[in-house]
Image: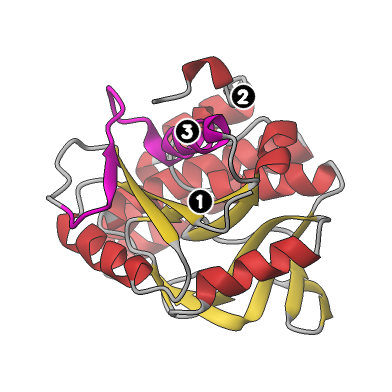
């Protein structure tokens, strides 16, 4: 198995961010191979040896992550890869340290760094040494074991973008894999380049996730909570965010009534 760490950065219409992210990853103190999955078709030129993978359409984050997983798994020279967002910035030792943890902890299927600015902080289930075991980690930086990805059947492409990282980790946990983050090393993101769209998609996909895991009544309650929050935001000066939240209601209701089927990893579509 190669010691080179394969990193896939999912890009969508944020050329300055992806250039900065690539520079950060290339400054790692380990051997890295960087791929940019260009969901929007407008990625800038990158320094060698960065490679650009271009799907034939915008796959969403989940679809692009599966695209990356298929590519990495088809190369057959490693059992790990990193899926990251176009705003990922890492410390020089982050990727090497994550790889070391994965090599010595075979039950960990998904591992992330310490969440610094721009990364959501998840509650800790238990801690051992430098590791915090959690239910899920941020998709901004996920080191994933190929076997875990295969067993989980990849990310759920019906979710498009946002919350797909949570859903992936929860299903990994359901199958007995540990999900953890390493406190010894950090990473940070820059946020969302499309904040109004993010608010809407997060609200929709949280309802979808709640419907699948907790049932109809729970998803209806969450939809009602989103309606209340969106209305309050509109009344208290956060009009754009409130409107984005309220725009999620139509699809949220559809998800609660009839959630779409999961769309998972299809190895027949591996890119070359």
Disc 3 residue crowd, few under 14, some 14–19, many 20+, Cα 10 Å: some
Residue 116: where, in percent of width, then height?
49, 80
Q: Quadrant of residue 76?
A: top right
Which tag, 2 or 1, sits closer to the chain's start? 1
Secondary structure of the residue carrying tag 1 is: helix
Q: In this view, does 74 lie above or below 137?
A: above
Q: In which quarter of the image is residue 232?
A: bottom left
As rendered, which of 175 and 148 lies closer to the eye?
148
From the viewer's perspective, tell me whether residue 64 is left or right of residue 74: left
From the viewer's perspective, tell me whether residue 217 is left or right of residue 201: right
Residue 225 shows in this picture: yes
Q: Nearer the viewer, mark 2 or mark 1?
A: 2
Disc 1 residue crowd, few under 14, some 14–19, many 20+, Cα 10 Å: many
Q: Which residue position is annotated with label 1?
A: 226
- Magenta segment boundaries in residue numbering: 46-75
Give the CA separation, mark 2 to mark 1.
Answer: 23 Å
Secondary structure of the residue carrying tag 3 is: helix
Disc 2 residue crowd, few under 14, some 14–19, many 20+, Cα 10 Å: few
Residue drawn at x 57%, y 21% as measured from the top left: 267
Residue drawn at x 80%, y 49% as measured from the top left: 173
Q: Is residue 33 magenta?
A: no
**CB under 8 Å between callouts 1 and 3?**
no
As rendered, which of 250 and 191 lies closer to the eye?
191
As rendered, which of 74 and 172 lies closer to the eye?
74
Q: Quadrant of residue 106?
A: bottom right
Residue 110: where, in percent of width, then height?
68, 55
Residue drawn at x 18%, y 35% as measured from the top left: 41
Q: Which residue position is annotated with label 3?
A: 71
Q: Which residue position is annotated with label 2?
A: 262
């Amino acid at each position: 198995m190669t010691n080179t760490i394969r990193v896939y950065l999912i890009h969508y219409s944020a050329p300055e961010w992806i250039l900065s992210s690539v520079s950060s990853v290339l400054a790692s103190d380990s051997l890295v191979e960087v791929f940019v999955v260009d969901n929007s078709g407008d990625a800038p030129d990158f320094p060698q040896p960065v490679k650009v993978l271009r799907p034939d359409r915008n796959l969403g984050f989940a679809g692009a992550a599966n695209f990356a997983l298929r590519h990495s798994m088809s190369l057959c020279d490693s059992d790990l890869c990193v899926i990251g967002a176009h705003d990922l910035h890492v410390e020089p030792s982050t990727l090497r340290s994550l790889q070391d943890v994965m090599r010595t902890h075979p039950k960990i299927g998904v591992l992330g760094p310490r969440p610094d600015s721009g990364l959501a902080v998840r509650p800790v289930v238990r801690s051992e040494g430098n590791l915090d075991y959690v239910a899920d980690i941020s998709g901004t930086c996920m080191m994933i074991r190929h076997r875990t990805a295969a067993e989980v059947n990849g990310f759920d492409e019906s979710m498009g973008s946002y919350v797909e990282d949570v859903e992936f980790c929860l299903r990994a946990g359901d199958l007995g894999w540990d999900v953890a983050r390493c406190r010894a090393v950090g990473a940070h993101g820059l946020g969302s380049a499309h904040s109004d769209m993010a608010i809407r998609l997060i609200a929709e996909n949280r309802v979808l996730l709640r419907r699948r895991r907790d049932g109809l009544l729970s998803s209806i309650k969450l939809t009602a909570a989103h309606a209340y929050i969106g209305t309050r935001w509109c009344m208290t000066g956060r009009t754009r965010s409130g409107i984005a939240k309220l725009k999620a209601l139509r699809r949220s209701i559809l998800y609660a009534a009839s959630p779409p089927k999961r769309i998972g990893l299809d190895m027949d579509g591996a890119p070359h």
